[in-house]
Image (cartoon, rainbow, N blue to C red):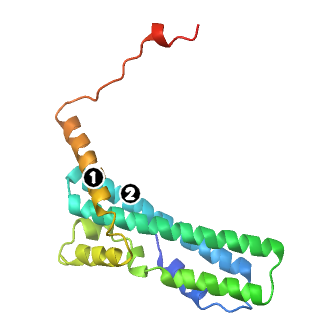
Amino acid sequence: MGVCFSKNFRKMGEISTTTSSDNLHEIRANIIDLIHSFHMIKRFCVAGYETCIHEKLRETAVIIKKKQRYIKRCLKNLRDCVKKLDDSIESGVKGNEKLDLIHEIQAIIREIDLQLFANDIQKIIHPGSDLAYPSKINEILDKKGFNDRSEEIYKEIDEKIAQISSKANGETGVRRRYDRNRNSTS
């Protein structure tokens, strides 16, 4: 079952070129469609991240985790836009206030890099003929400000890989002991 994102990305272009005479309800509906599409891509990132952890692809897992965080940030911005639209619709905003709101939403949408909103997780994990593709995505993410958290991501990935390795070796986790006599309430 595939997911078609092209229709929603066309709507993204429509939002960025909308005029003040457009209906705020239509803009809100288009943004909600974008949120759904971005959420699906985020889910693909989560699945790809888990695949990288299991295959012990540390560098690839970092790229996918950065992409997931970028998508999460964009989703938050789009949800904030929907909240502003809801507040404006409820209060009946008209004229210059409506125009200012539309321009603000257009600016937020123009900041979103559409190259990062492709369902390219398999292409990042297994680049095939285009070996430079993962590094290209990583460069885009670094330009967006996600290079400062790399050490934190590496630490998280190393912990998860160590957990998987310990489970594969038959090691069990340490269980906490519970003393009924000491912890009873009576």
Which quarter of the rendering shows the N terminus? bottom left
Q: SS at mark 2?
A: helix
Image point 79% across, 89% down: which residue?
A: 95
Amino acid type, residue under disc 2 in the picture: Val
Q: Nearer the viewer, residue 73 or 147?
A: 147
Labels 2 and 1: the sequence-earlier one: 2
Q: SS at mark 1?
A: helix
Image point 62% across, 69% down: which residue?
A: 80
Residue 108 appears at what percent x and percent y?
A: 55, 80
Amino acid type, residue under disc 1 in the picture: Lys
Q: Mark 2 Cα within 10 Å, few/some/many (few <14, many 20+)? A: some
- Residue 121: image quadrant is bottom left
* Residue hosting label 1: 155
Q: Nearer the viewer, residue 17 or 119?
A: 17
* Residue hosting label 2: 46
- Residue 29: image quadrant is bottom right
In the rendered structure, the answer to whether residue 93 lies left or right of residue 186 reads: right
Image point 18% across, 72% down: which residue?
A: 128
Residue 136 shows in this picture:
yes
Residue 155 appears at what percent x and percent y?
A: 27, 52
Which quarter of the rendering shows the C terminus? top right
The residue at the far right in this view is 92
Residue 2 shows in this picture:
no
Q: Residue 125: which numbered mark, if any?
A: none
